[in-house]
Structures are given as C-alpha cells and as structure tokens.
Amino acid sequence: MIATFVHIWVKEAHIDDFIAATIENHKQSVQEPGNLRFDMLRDAGNPAKFVLYEAYLSDEDAASHKSTAHYLKWRDQVADWMAQPRQGIRHEIVYPVEVSAW
Amino acid sequence: MIATFVHIWVKEAHIDDFIAATIENHKQSVQEPGNLRFDMLRDAGNPAKFVLYEAYLSDEDAASHKSTAHYLKWRDQVADWMAQPRQGIRHEIVYPVEVSAW
C-alpha cells in the first residue's frame, strides 16, 4: 500500500476553480479499483495551500491513476492555476495493514 | 471536520519501539467517537520520518483525543524517542463533506 501527499499552492484568483475541479477528480478517483483515500484538505493557516492525500493498494494502482481520463482532465484544468509546482511526497503505509480497515 | 498531519522524526534506535507504541495508540484512537482517520505513514525516502494523519468530526473531538489515557500513555512513551520536536499542521477538510464518505 502506498500513500502520497500532494502539496498544492493555488493562485488566489483560482481557488474556487481549483476546488471545483478537484471535487470532480475526487468523485472519479474514489471509484478506481485500488483507491483507498482521496481526501482534499486545506491548510488552516493558508487558504491558498492544499493537500491531496491519496492512498492506493499498490504502486501499480497509484500509477494507473495518472493515466485515467479524469486525472488527465484535472491536470490540464489546474495547470495555469498553480502558484508554484506541486510536490508529491510518497509514503509507505505502516498501519493499519488490513485492507478492510481502509 | 478537521485533519492534522503530525510530522515525527524518530531516533533510529527507537524506530521499532515507536511503531509498536503508535499501533497501540491507533487501535484505541480509531474507537474514539468523532475519529475519522488515524493513518500511520512512513516517508518512502526516510525510514526515520513518520506522519500521523488524524481526522476528527470536530475541533472538540480532536481536542478530546489529547486527554485520553491512550494518547497520554503514547505521549509519555515516545517522548525520549523523538529526534526533534513533533510538528502538527492543521487542515480543514474540503472534500468529501459527507461524514458517511469517511
């Protein structure tokens, strides 16, 4: 199992656009086989800073996400709304280990 | 709803102790009313760096966690195993908004 924190800094003028596009991405992503989490979070101290917490059963499942139509649409939609490049930080899942707990 | 990333740097000699103590904390924490997430993650590039991803229904639920016996036990257990002070970063939950989706 693998989890990635995607740190995202959004241009202030496009925060609402970004949220709407990411909700659409969320709705499709959680339907993917192998998806465990797709939580959209906003820094309590910086309304233009977001984190997507994405977890998948396997590296292959995480990689497959990036070839889905909904991911590619989101990627293109948000490209001009980024205030700086996104940063994805990969993590191993230590616990829980049972898939049913996710 | 509120989510906190707790960034934790562990002394190498105590990584196994830290994992064992945190699994116990996890098992109790997910039983708390109001707990939505308590995921234990390890940086893929640094085996001594962990993140606890903790989400709660409300600020009050998150605050109550810190007065539970299992949290206080964990806090005392891990105190000498930290390589540097923990950093908790609070986030609002943007999506999903339905509690049933958590």
Image (cartoon, coloured by chain):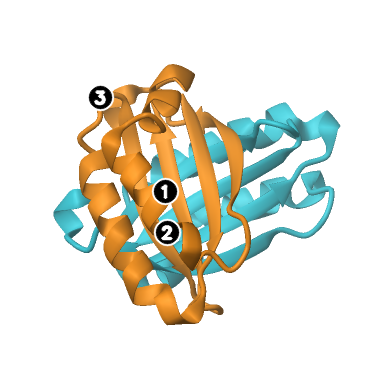
Chain colours: A cyan, B orange
Few, some or many residues within 10 Å of mark 1 (<14, 14–19, 20+) = some
Chain containing the residue with disc 3: B
Left/right of residue A72 with respect to residue B52 in the rendered view: right
**Number of numbered labels in the structure image:** 3
Of the residues shown, which amino acid type is indicated by label 2? Answer: Val
Dot 3 or dot 2: first in sequence order is 3
Residue A30 pos. (x, y %):
35, 46
Residue B83 pos. (x, y %):
58, 69
Of the residues shown, which amino acid type is indicated by label 1? Answer: Arg
- Residue corresponding to mark 3: B33
Residue at 49% from the left image edge and 36% from the top image edge: B3
Chain containing the residue with disc 2: B
Q: Are marks 2 and 1 in contact (CB under 8 Å)?
A: yes
Residue A16 pos. (x, y %):
70, 27
The label shown at residue B9 is none
Residue at 75% from the left image edge and 52% from the top image edge: A79
- Residue corresponding to mark 2: B78
Task: Give the quadrant of residue A87.
Answer: bottom right
